[in-house]
Amino acid sequence: MLALIYLGLAIALGDVLCRRFYRFVSIAHRWAAAALVGVLLSTWFTYLAMLAFSHLSEPLLSADLLFFVLAAGAIFWLSRRVRKVETITPLAPGSSMWDWIALGALFAMACVLLIGTFYVNKQGRIRLAETQASDFASQLASAQNFALAHNFQIELAHYASQRGHYQFPFYF
């Protein structure tokens, strides 16, 4: 539940920031820009705040709490001065319908891809398809390292059971 609140705050912050600098083509363009900017900035902030709080016993919790407070304050402060949302040009009739059809098709393909590549078994463990292990396992190893070990690796492992290697800055 907290992850959904975090994601919602990140997207809302991205929307407030994007409205200050961009004029959008459509609502879908506004949502995409808000999601990309918000998630990018919030994850950067959380990672760097976690690095600053690394001396605490729960650095991720402290970084998340700091993000919740600062993001809510920034949304409140910036939303009072944000300009009205305006589009660049009016859309052609029927074009938004095709945007939603394309978005629905991409969502369906992403769901099929996720169902086909990994699942959670009855013991609560994530299982990967063999073809995806080389791509997804390195990110899982990093996430598991943050979740359990409370340390900041300078290397990234190919498998969740291995130590990391030199490619961590590339993935970061």
Image: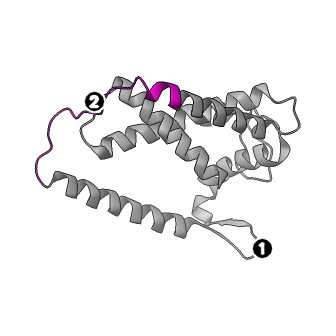
User: Residue 5: x percent and y percent?
Assistant: 60, 48
Query: Dot 2, how many residues are within 10 Å of its Cα: few (below 14), some (14-19), or many (20+)?
Result: some
User: Residue 115: x percent and y percent?
Assistant: 53, 69
Residue at image point 15% right, 44% down: 91
- Quadrant in the rendering for residue 152: top right
Left or right of residue 17: residue 10 = right
Residue 96 sits above or below residue 123 on the image:
above
Residue sticking out furthest to the front:
80
User: Residue 133: x percent and y percent?
Assistant: 64, 58
Quadrant (top left/top right/bottom left/bottom right) for the N terminus: bottom right
Residue at numbered disc 2: 23
Q: CA distance from mark 1 to mark 2?
A: 48 Å
Left or right of residue 146: residue 149 = right
Helix, strand, or loop for circle 2? Answer: loop
Q: Give whichever of 20, 111 is nearer the camera.
A: 20
Q: Name the N-terminal-most of marks 1 and 2.
A: 2
Residue 91 sits above or below residue 98 on the image:
above
Residue at image point 37% right, 24% down: 20
Residue 120 sits above or below residue 41 on the image:
below
Residue at image point 67% right, 35% down: 168
Query: Label 1 sits on what residue type?
Result: Gln
- Quadrant in the rendering for residue 22: top left
Magenta highlight on residue 78: yes
Q: Which residues are magenta?
A: 76-93
- Are discs 1 and 2 less than 8 Å apart at CB? no
Closer to the eye: label 1 or 2: 2
Residue at numbered disc 1: 123
Query: Label 2 sits on what residue type?
Result: Arg
User: Residue 153: x percent and y percent?
Assistant: 77, 35
Query: Dot 1, how many residues are within 10 Å of its Cα: few (below 14), some (14-19), or many (20+)?
Result: few
